[in-house]
Amino acid sequence: AATPGAAAPTAAVLRRPSVRRRGHYFVYLTSWVVLALSVSADLLVKIAAPALSSAEHLVPVVAVTYLAYGMFRLTYQTATFPSKRQWFIACSVLSSVAFAAASAVLVPVMGATGAMVALTFAWTLALLALLLVAKLKSHPVGTDWLRTISTIALAGACYGAYRVAREAGPAPAHAAAALVVVAYPLLLAALRLLPRTQVSAVGHVVRAMFRRPSRTELVVSLRGLDADEHALLAAVFERGFTPEQIAFSRRVGGDVVFGELVRTVRSVSPTGGKSSAADADIGRFLLFRGARPERDAMWQRLATQGVDPLELDSLEATVRRLRRAPRRAWRTSRPRAPVAAAG
């Protein structure tokens, strides 16, 4: 049994906006993608191959299956109860057994559709089982389930409106498909399912899906750094020094270098951001290349410090760009004054 003292940190985590936002962002964007795929299923199968036109009805079911699986994975990543990995494996095994049993019943009746319905059922069952375990261990997952269910229900209502329009013919159906895809995020905001404080953050994610900064923009950003900042980034991402090595050469603490690194990465990131007390931990997270469970634990610690998941995602994308930057980009953006501390 959990003691009140042990439960207190978990309650603090659940009150952190960053933990709750992570689930909200996922549900908003994934429901939107599922809706877009579902209403454009007739076009997608024609693009793939005319012979697949009979499989149009499978696209929405497949999309919903991935939504269920994604929510299962998200629940595991945001859960905080002990031995969650063992329970994640157990729930995954449960989903396999449930899929086999449901397929034996549904496939003879529904064919290929029955197989996908069985898979959706299996992942949903695994999700519910993991949520139940978290609840029984007094570590409930910090998600606003009323908002989550309402968001998914709104997507279902939009798809229902599209199906009604299809009865009127191809032209009204295509117009309705475009309308519901555009109207869905607007309805989320109008119904307060998407709070105004999160509208700009979700907009940033959508823009990032369709636009990646060019190499020229990266060089311009690097040129805007002073000599010390440029040398630090070049030492880590071009020459392969670790922050610990740089800290040793400067005779300063590792937290100092990790904090400087994150502040410098922010300055070349398209979204920018403000410095925080968690910068050193963010730096360790960004450069960490170990096992996934350890990375999840690092994310949990950042969540308790109020780190916004969207800001973290933006910083990760910038770090990937810096790691892939060619030597020419570093040479052409190098300031005139060398810095001994980076060498």
Image (cartoon, rainbow, N blue to C red):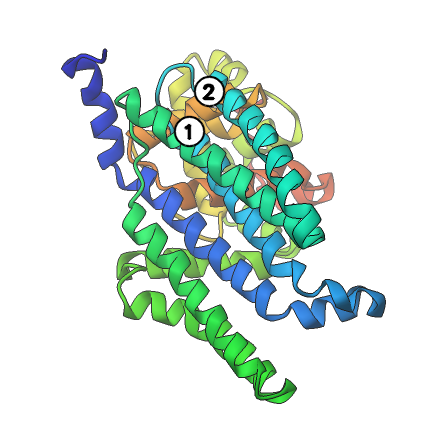
* 329, 27: nearer the viewer: 27
Q: Which residue is mark 1?
A: 130
What residue sits 52% from the left and 18% below the top? 246
Judge from the rendering whether residue 172 lies leftward or rightward of residue 75; answer left or right: right
**115 w.r.t. 248: above or below:** below
The label number, if any, that marks residue 269 in the structure image: none
Residue at image point 52% right, 20% down: 90
- In the figure, is residue 162 to the left or right of 40? left
Against 180, is 219 above or below?
A: above
Residue 2 is situated, as x and y percent measured from the top left of the image, at: 22, 13
Q: Give the mark nearer the N terminus: 1 vs 2.
A: 2
Residue placed furthest toward the left: 4
Q: Secondary structure at mark 2?
A: helix
Depth check: 20 or 289 in front? Answer: 20
Report x, y in % for residue 210.
Answer: 59, 61
**Residue under the image location 36 percent in, 60 percent down:** 200
x%, y% of residue 6? 21, 14
As displayed, is residue 222 above or below residue 286? below
Using the rendered image of the protein, determine whether residue 225 is visible from the camera's viewpoint. no
Q: Which mark is residue 87?
A: 2
Task: Name the residue rendered at 30%, 60% in the picture.
Answer: 193
Q: Is residue 167 at all visible to an observer of this figure?
A: yes
Q: Quadrant of residue 122?
A: top right
Specify the amino acid type for callout 1.
Answer: Leu
| Cβ atoms under marks 1 and 2 closer than 8 Å | yes
Is disc 1 surrounded by few (<14), some (14 to 19) or many (20+) residues within 10 Å?
A: many
Q: Nearer the viewer, residue 146 or 312?
A: 146
Q: Identify which amino acid the numbered label 2 is placed on.
A: Trp
Tell me the quarter of the picture where residue 234 sits: top right
Q: Quadrant of residue 238?
A: top right
